[in-house]
Amino acid sequence: MRPFLCRLFWFVLPIVLVLVIGILLPPTPRASTSFLFAGPQKDRLLQETASPRIIFVGGSNLTFGLNCQMIRDSLNLNPINTGLHAMMGLRYMLENTIQYVKEGDIVVLCLEYNQFHRDYNAPSEELMRMVLDVQFSKIKLLSPGQSANMLAFIPKYVLTKLRPSEYRNVKENDIYGVHSFNEFGDVDKHWGKPRVEFPTLNRMAVRIHPGVVGKIREFGARLGRKNATLLIAYPGLQDLSFAKSIRSIEAIDQELRRQGFTILGRPERYQIPDRMMFNTPYHLNKEGVDYRTRLFIEDFQQYRRSKQADNPES
């Protein structure tokens, strides 16, 4: 038994050493151009943007779906678009946002619909890279189980650091790069570019993942203790993809309304005509961005009027 364990130890040791060294190596030049490295820029917006503020929380439906200049001009609020990627997960989005919220902030949670079908603590390669490549301090935002489950992505992560292509002829992607974001956190580098063809989304499940809505309620309560406000908005989604998952989307809307959230508009209002799409069912071209932004502004103005009618002295 002892010789077997000894051979096993010497077999496993080099593998472990390679993995550890790979983790400790700095991000590759190619990885360093990724949009994930814009995370600190968005954190600075949360830290430094003056009140009154409206903070948008979600994935790339926001990154490729808002014109915050229009929002600032129309609503007289300072917008912050925190969107990066849906695969960052709901827990990370909420925990990263709450630490920067100030009194009087309006937080608009606008999630891709599949967030309601994922585990609140789901791991992802993007989340792992945010921690290991961009800001290791972000690990405090994750649950212990989430951190442990990210170990499954480590071998692939280490292998990328050994590829020559990660170091040669590196050119930043102008759409998905660290410098793709404007002063508000929107991606605007694709405005005016031709459409890139893409498939529609598969039909989504109807059942909402247990606990997700409850975590959003907890987030709303935490905002309330900071004298901030939570609003729910819906993402702009390609009309063809919307039609395939209408039962799932209706179930999400019904559950959110049953739970008493303040919701801006209805999902069907944010079906985006296919001609306004850019390169995924959630990414809009310039015409789509402005169209979706106008819808949001109208719904927010309606919310303001209703709130003022309920509290005429405020």
Image (cartoon, rainbow, N blue to C red):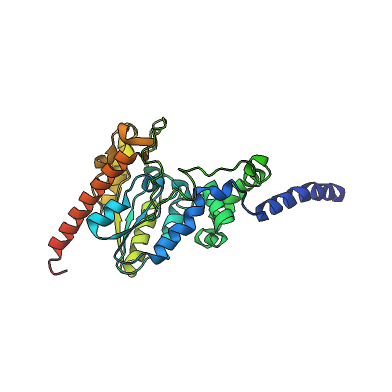
Residue in the picture at 47% in, 50% down: 179
Question: In the image as oriented, which residue stretches furthest toward the right?
Answer: 3
- Among the 4 quarters of the image, the one containing residue 231: bottom left
Whether residue 278 is visible to the viewer of this picture, yes or no, is yes
Residue closest to the eye, 45 or 210: 45
**Residue 201 occupies quadrant:** top left
Left or right of 224 in this view: 31:
right
Q: Could you say where residue 117 lies in the image, as x and y percent from the top left?
A: 41, 44
Q: Position of residue 162 (x, y in %)?
A: 68, 44
Residue 180: where, in percent of width, then height?
45, 48
Label total for image: 0
Where's the C terminus, which quadrant? bottom left
Is 6 positioned to the left or the right of 207 in the image?
right
Q: Relative to residue 161, is residue 241 depicted above or below?
A: above
The answer to whether residue 139 is left or right of residue 244 is right
Q: Which sits in the foreground, 128 or 169? A: 169
Residue 165 x %, y %: 64, 40
Residue 205 vs residue 198, the one in the foreground:
198
The image quarter in which residue 252 lies: top left
Examine the rendering and report whether any part of residue 280 can be seen: no
What residue is rendered at 50% in x and 60% in y? Answer: 141
